[in-house]
Amino acid sequence: MTISTNYYNYSSSLFSSTSQGSGSSDGSNNILGQYMSIKNGSYKKLLTAYYKKMDAEESGSSSSAGATSDKSKILAAKKDADTLKESADKLLATGKNSIWEQVEKEVKDEKTGEMVKVKEYDYDRIVKAINDFASSYNSVLDSASKQNDLSVLKTTAYMTGITKSNKVALGKMGITIGADNKLTVDESKLKAADISSLKSYFTGSSSFAGRIQGKAFDISKSAMNAVNSLKTYNKGGIINKSGDLGNWFDMVC
């Protein structure tokens, strides 16, 4: 197998960069740095890893399986965060799309027995929206825990902190926080909750739902940034945005 000129240039630049900064004008430190890399086995490991990478490419396998796996996990976190934001959007919607507007219904008058029109809150719709919100929230916790991007993890942890700070109030509405930080909704208790309390926690940008919506947006943005930061080099020396060759080099050396 023939190693491309681009790869030789890349590996040479890696070795030379380790010896620059305190080198002499005659380049002796640069030569010494390359010699030490060869002597301690780093150069051999780099070549061995390179050959394996080329073999994998020639056999049709992915040359960046690890990076691809990381990318899939991060994209899953982004997708779940987007879904959580959409669930929060439904709770926060105003106007004709608001679930908090009273709807006109026909009910039987207990005294007269006649059907009369009254305006009531649609608790079935409210409960469904909060259930969807809780389910989406739990999915974010699952997907965020399966990948290693620090920004996503920190933002998710911050989000759970917001939820914990509202634990008592949420509990009174039938929304409890488990040991795993996930939300559980007691529908009967939620339907019996005071409507003004529900509206105070699930409407408005500064409400609980509004703050979680903001964190969901941040998680999605952090995940997208993490995906964009992944890059690797193919056998022609061209950058592919699917893995980090610097980290790969560190691992094999």
Image (spheres, rainbow, N blue to C red):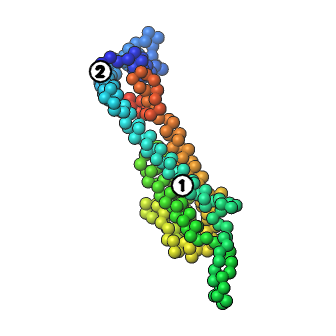
**Gap between marks 1 and 2, in whole Å?**
53 Å
Q: Amino acid at mark 1?
A: Leu
Q: Residue at x 43, y 63 (%)?
A: 179
Residue tagged 1: 84
Image coords of residue 111 (percent x, y): 66, 90
Dot 2 falls on a residue whose secondary structure is helix
**Residue drawn 46% across the image and 29% down it:** 240
Residue under circle 2?
39
Figure quadrant of the N terminus:
top left
Amino acid at circle 2 = Lys
Pinpoint residue 79: horizontal percent, then vertical percent.
50, 48
- Residue at the top extreme? 26
Locate the C terminus and report the quarter of the image it occupies.
top left
In the depicted view, which residue is nearer to us: 19 or 193? 193
**At 45% across and 23% down in the image, what residue appears?**
238
Which class describes the residues within 10 Å of circle 1: few (<14), some (14-19), or many (20+)? Answer: many
- First of labels 1, 2 by sequence position: 2
Residue sitting nearer the eye, 212 or 190: 190
The residue lying toward the viewer, choosing from 114 and 61, is: 114
- Mark number, residue 210: none
Q: Is residue 166 above or below residue 225?
A: below
